[in-house]
Amino acid sequence: MLDDLEFDDGGARLLEQIAHQEALNAATRFPLRDEDLADTLCKKLPEDVGIAAIPRSKVAGATMHDVWHVARIMEALRISREDQEVHGRCGNCGEPGHDTGDCLG
Ligand SMILES: [Zn+2]
């Protein structure tokens, strides 16, 4: 069921896709346990998300709580990165496209 799962790299779809997989799992006759679903998702998620989720609970393995936690952080980072690309301006010269620390002007 989850075997054909493929995550796009980042994007708003990440959270959407995790929610979708949770719903799919819940709808099956024999749903995976929380840890097993998390484990499966961690192997399918973009590498940085999967790796980040696992060490949070070394003993028991990742839980869906971990997966959501990391995915939300990744999403927030992506949004702030995009926001900076669109709206970011140098604090020194006021030009977009670079940070104050990178300013050559
Ligand atoms: Zn500048």
Image (cartoon, grey):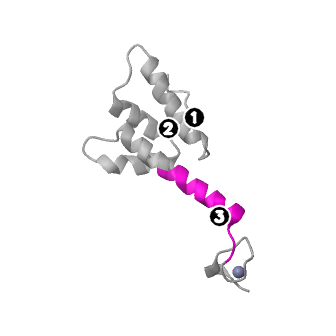
Kindly report the distance in space between the C-alpha atoms of the residues bearing marks 1 and 2.
7 Å
Q: Secondary structure at mark 3?
A: helix
The image shows residue 101, relative to residue 31, as above or below, that is below
Residue for badge 2: 44
Inspect the magenta stretch and tell me whether residue 69 lies in it.
Answer: no
Residue for badge 3: 84
User: Which of the two labelled residues, at mark 3 and mark 2, occupies the earlier sequence position?
Assistant: 2
The image shows residue 4, relative to residue 56, as above or below, that is above
Please name the residue shown 44% across and 42% down the image.
68
Q: Secondary structure at mark 1?
A: loop
Tag 2: residue type?
Lys
Relative to residue 85, is residue 10 drawn left or right?
A: left
Tag 1: residue type?
Glu
Task: Provide the major secondary structure of the magenta segment.
Answer: helix
The image shows residue 57, relative to residue 18, as above or below, that is below
Mark 1 Cα within 10 Å, few/some/many (few <14, many 20+)?
Answer: few
Most extreme residue toward the top is 29
Please name the residue shown 48% across and 25% down the image.
23
Please name the residue shown 49% across and 26% down the image.
2
Relative to residue 38, is residue 95 drawn left or right?
A: right
Residue for badge 1: 6
Instruction: Report the number of numbered marks.
Output: 3
Q: Quadrant of residue 16?
A: top right
Label 1 CB less than 8 angstroms from ligand 1: no
The image shows residue 99, relative to residue 5, as above or below, that is below
Q: Nearer the viewer, mark 1 or mark 3?
A: 3
Range covered by the magenta-colored residues: 73-90
Please name the residue shown 51% across and 27% down the image.
3
